[in-house]
Image (tube, rainbow, N blue to C red):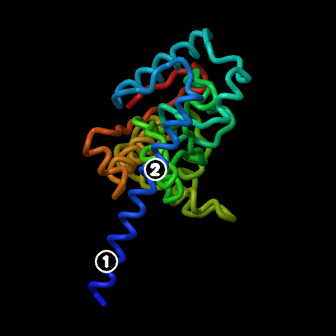
Amino acid sequence: MCNDRSTDTISRRGLFAGGMALSLAGATASGSLAQSSEPAPATPEEPLQRLIAGNARYVSNTAVNQDHSAARSARALGQQPFAAIVACADSRAVPEFIFDQGPGDLFVVRVAGNFINDDGLASLEFGAAVLGIKTIVVLGHTGCGAVDATIKSIRDKELPPGHLPHLVNAIRPAVYDVMSEAPGDLLAAATARNAKLNAERTATADPILSEMHAAGKVTSVAGVYDISTGKVDFL
């Protein structure tokens, strides 16, 4: 029975690997037809530089991605985003605007507090292993209500109602980390730490993302978006 189970496990893994390879080939083939004039990044450093340049355009009000109807029919053929962004659900923190990118350029995972749970990891694994994404950015932002609510919950020693405790419990480690340092701006410090912790989680998440990071195929970084200036500071 042990041998049977071992064989079954190997065959399942082989099937999974084969399916991912086929999906990747299909996504790349269709995505190449839908891709913008920018070439697909060859290294994990290239997407980050593209994001930095796009954010600079956004800050200076010289955005170039303003016609979102352009290439609509081409996008129907497939997708080939060049970076993944884990962003807060805050309505003011829109990754495509912040980095001056068009539809199909970014693979975005959004949840209040920009933390990563198992569902988020599954999405990022798909983005990296199937769509070929080479850079993952975990993006916090100034004045984050989710982080602020977590701080309040800790200070008041009381959990919020409904499903909100799930959110608080996910962000709580970052708040505890910085509280011991007594920062002048606890909200800002906790926001930055939360982004860093979740970027680190993507780099160590077994088995897919950790192996891709170790092989230099993917990189993860953290950043904080300043809502008042539009600028992203990478940490």
Query: Can I make out residue 33 in this image?
Result: yes
Distance from disc 2 to disc 1, alpha carbons, whole Å, reads 22 Å
* Residue indicated by mark 2: 22
Lateral position of residue 220 relative to residue 172, left or right? left
Q: Is residue 139 among the parts visible in the rendering?
A: no
* Above or below 157: residue 67: above
Q: In front here: 110 or 156? A: 110
Which quadrant is home to the N terminus? bottom left
Which image quadrant for residue 194? Answer: top left
Label 1 amino acid? Thr
Secondary structure at badge 1 equals: helix
Neighbor class of circle 2 (other Cα within 10 Å; few <14, some 14-19, many 20+) is few
- For mark 1, does the 10 Å Cα neighbourhood hold few (<14), some (14 to 19), or many (20 or more) residues? few
Q: Label 1 near label 2: C-beta < 8 Å?
A: no
Figure check: 41 above or below 128: above
Q: Which dot marks residue 137?
A: none
Q: In this image, 18 relative to 122: left or right?
A: left
Instruction: Report the front residue among 24 and 223.
Output: 24
Disc nearer the start of the sequence (2/1)? 1
Q: Position of residue 108 (x, y in %)?
A: 57, 40
**x, y percent for residue 6:** 29, 78
User: Measuring 63% from the left and 43% from the top, which residue is drawn there?
Assistant: 89
Q: Position of residue 21 (x, y in %)?
A: 42, 50
The spot of residue 121 in percent (x, y) is 47, 53
Question: Which residue is rendered at x = 52% and y = 21% of the image?
Answer: 231
- Disc 2 is placed on an element classified as helix
Tell me the residue that label 1 is attached to.
7
Quarter of the figure that contains the C terminus: top left
The tally of labels here is 2
**Amino acid of disc 2:** Leu
